[in-house]
Image: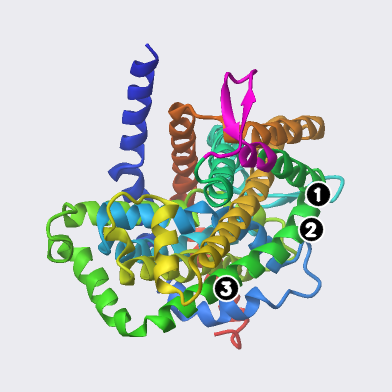
Amino acid sequence: MLEEINGILTKLDDFLWGAPLMVLILTGGVYLTCRLGLMQLRRLPLALKWMVRNEEGGEGEVTSFAALCTALSATIGTGNIVGVATAICAGGPGALFWMLVAAFFGMATKYAEGLLAVKFRVVDKENHVLGGPFYYIEQGMGQKWKFLARIFAFFGVCVGLFGIGTFSQVNGIASAIKDFFDPNDSYMVDLPFLGTSYSWTVVLSSLVLALCVALVVIGGIQRIAHVSQVVVPAMAVLYVLVCVVLLVCNVQRIPAAFVHIVKGAFHPSAVTGGVVGSMIIAMQKGVARGIFSNEAGLGSAPIAAAAAKTNEPVRQGLVSMTGTFIDTIVICTMTGLSIVLTGAWQVEGLEGVQVTTYAFQNGLPIPNEVSAFILMMCLVFFAFTTILGWDYYSERCLEYLSGSKRAVKIYRWLYILAVFTGPYMTVAAVWTIADIFNGLMALPNMIALFALSGVVVKETRVFFKKNKNDR
């Protein structure tokens, strides 16, 4: 019976994350790109300038930069290191090309999400700012669509508690720590209540991680934003610098790597020797990883964008747009190039983080232990900030559903408990269900983006007509 249920869930997951969802999200990005006149190209310099320049006198709870870092904390996670490797191994180097295509159009989607989040946000009696897809569905599309907003919020709570926010990230952290400190299972401890043994590194990491998460999430958005705007930029800069060193040390291989990436996008067999299937597989793996990494279209990032101290929806939309640029076009590209030019994707027997580790160990002019340690630390901190970001997202979803601050407080403790138990979760169905919930979040959000695209275009035109110097 259990195997049958797992089979049904797997088929549903494969269908949802197959052509239907990817086509819907990619079509939305192309549609918004056309209506906004290549906004992501024309306004990117302005967006990057505003990313680090906070608006004076803006209303909200945190600065625009802090809101962006909160959103990035949820998107920059294990996917940037493990997911990119998985996509390239399954679809060949061409998957990176399609990942960048998805990110390019996803920037327009993220712009629209950020703009709508600020335009339709609400402020409660305690001056608490609330916003996100559930509010721009309800406020922008009308009360008759409120059921769609509730559906989004319900799936958002489920994703945070059972999926991206907890189990998958915590497992990534525990596995990375164990693989570095105890790869041969030399230090085991019996856990009778679980009926099995675990490495001490797993037990200790679960305790320390749960404590660190508790210290942050109990403080709410202010503390999450404060930690995110310190940790996210620091780890992102460190990771990018390490990748730049790797690329510089192997600069002679970069032209060939680009040839493999472009050729592999349209004719994979010419690069892989027929080992990896077709252009369709490369496209599917790349687009899916791009969407999953930067979350453009899923509706999560606008929840953080709504809290920004700004009075201009267009301005925050541009700042939100830089999140996709940083997450995928910068960080994922760095990972992908490192994997392709070192040939790590072709090494048999390697999967997931092992592929990226091989690339670092064979591409950096430092001892293998040092490069492996750097990658482990980046993975741990990226995953940790993802846990924080998704706690905030799911709390806002629950607050919209219940309207109760007490329910949110109870939820925080459940979230911390899920983080603590995450390393011991081994049921495959848990991750499959998480993927399904994550995909289902996108459906009501994309409906809203299509319905409110006219609002996005109008707001954009009015803003730049009024602010002619910001062209």
Q: Earlier in the sequence, mark 3 or mark 1?
A: 1
Q: Quadrant of residue 72?
A: bottom right
- To which residue does mark 1 refer? 128
Residue type at numbered disc 2: Glu
Residue type at numbered disc 1: His
> Residue 462 bears which disc, if any?
3
> Magenta span covers which residues?
185-205
Query: Who is closer to the viewer here, 111 or 289?
Result: 289
The percent coordinates of residue 304 (x first, y second) are 66, 54
Q: Quadrant of the C terminus?
A: bottom right
> Which residue is painted at 37% across and 61% down in the image?
102
Q: Residues within 10 Å of mark 2 (few under 14, many from 20)?
A: many
Q: Where 6 falls versus 440 (above or below)?
A: above
**Residue 150 at least partly seen:** no
Query: Which secondary structure, mark 3?
Result: helix
Q: Where 292 falls versus 308 (above or below)?
A: above
> Residue 61 bears which disc, if any?
2
